[in-house]
Amino acid sequence: MTGTIHLISQKNSSSGLPHYLYNALLPYHNITFIDSGAFLLPKICNLISSFHIDRKKWSHRRSMISTYSVEGWNRNTILNGILLDRVMKSGDKILQIGGLYAPHPNAAQLEYYLFTTYTMKLAFQDGYSRWVPDQDEREGFVALEQHLYNKAQHIFVASDFVRRHLMLEYSIPPDQVTAVSMGVDDFFVKNMRMKLPHSPTKKCLFVGYTFNLKGGPDVLKAFYIAREHIPELELVIIGPNYSNEMHQDGVIYVGAVTDREKLLRYYRDADLFLLPSRCDSFGFVFLEAMTQSLVCVGSNMNAMPEIIVDGATGYIVEPGDYQRMAEVIIEFYEHPELRIPMGHHARERVLNRFTWPRVVAAMESVMFS
């Protein structure tokens, strides 16, 4: 089942998905990266044409021009085509991550596969995604996205939620899209926590760089209520920039943590992982927490109910329902006999359902059938 796969993606995507897939496929296939960002001249042109004296506005305008516009789609598609033509041979497979461009200007005549975790229509609907085309660009962008999906040989998605969405909103036939899930970073698999401490630490943990989008304000409200019942409770916040709302008793602000060994220690020092996102394409951090036998609290949207089994490996709350989240935290600590079995079930769920070899095997069965 070996072959050559041309992986079309932004190589340095913040999600890490391109590298996860690359590393998972590499033992069995010859993999080449096709990244339109490899061309220097378009980058320089985008920098100049998007210039603004305000650096944040400059960055946003650059992203709009380079990626989230019809112009950006067409430009990146042409650049992908140039790179692909240099290496493409008969029998090679094309696998594109995401739907922000096409793999080639003549993609309709090629056999290509897609792996996507979200769509632009979902981004329009969630109300939190910053990276969407301007209003006057949306119809044209979605038309290009629709054509990309229609012409794909097959579409792989990270969740049943996105699969149902593609079928309903983009009219993709059920047999053309497969939910293969995603996997946890191998570092956390190799360093699983097999045995929980006998006593709880009374620490909750939040890990997320986009605080509002990941439900951070809801976590703070829930924690404030829960701490009135459990005075020794603490909340550790990792990732986002500091804000004044984090200045309350029991909250420990850490900030960015890039060292995985250090992050592992924070996971192991907690009892509960809280991330009730208002918008999330999947949620890798849930899988990381679950490898450390942490009970997780997520919201009832996107992939989270597929990752967390409510009442068995964690808890699901409605987005924004901080009152219910506070109740969940209090109930969790009022029933200490649940912590260890729930944590062990969470760890086993990761091993059984969320590993990259399992994801790749599901994709290969379609691509090389």
Image (tube, rainbow, N blue to C red):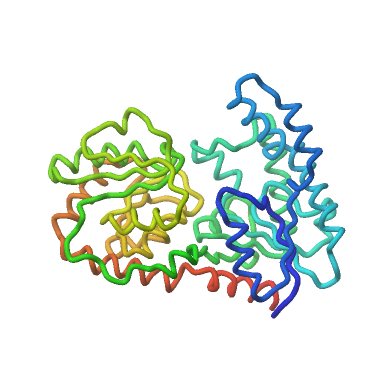
250 or 355, which lies in front? 250
**Front-lying residue, 176 or 155:** 155
Quarter of image, res 353: bottom left
Q: Residue at x 68, y 32 (%)?
A: 62
- Residue at x 24%, y 33% (from the top left corner): 248
Identify the residue shown where x is 14% and y is 46%: 230
Q: Is residue 348 above or below residue 218?
A: below
In which quarter of the view is residue 343 placed? bottom left
For the C terminus, the quadrant is bottom right
Image quarter where the N terminus lies is bottom right
Which percent across, then down, holds residue 47?
A: 73, 30
Left or right of 116? Residue 66 is right
- In this view, the residue in front, 233 or 66, is 233
Q: Residue furthest bottom?
A: 1
Location of residue 10 in the rendering, given as x and y in whole percent from the top left corner: 67, 50
Please tell me how many numbered marks the rendered image carries: 0
Residue 236, horizontal then vertical, whole percent = 30, 45
Residue 299: % across, % down: 37, 49
Residue drawn at 75 percent across, 71 percent down? 4
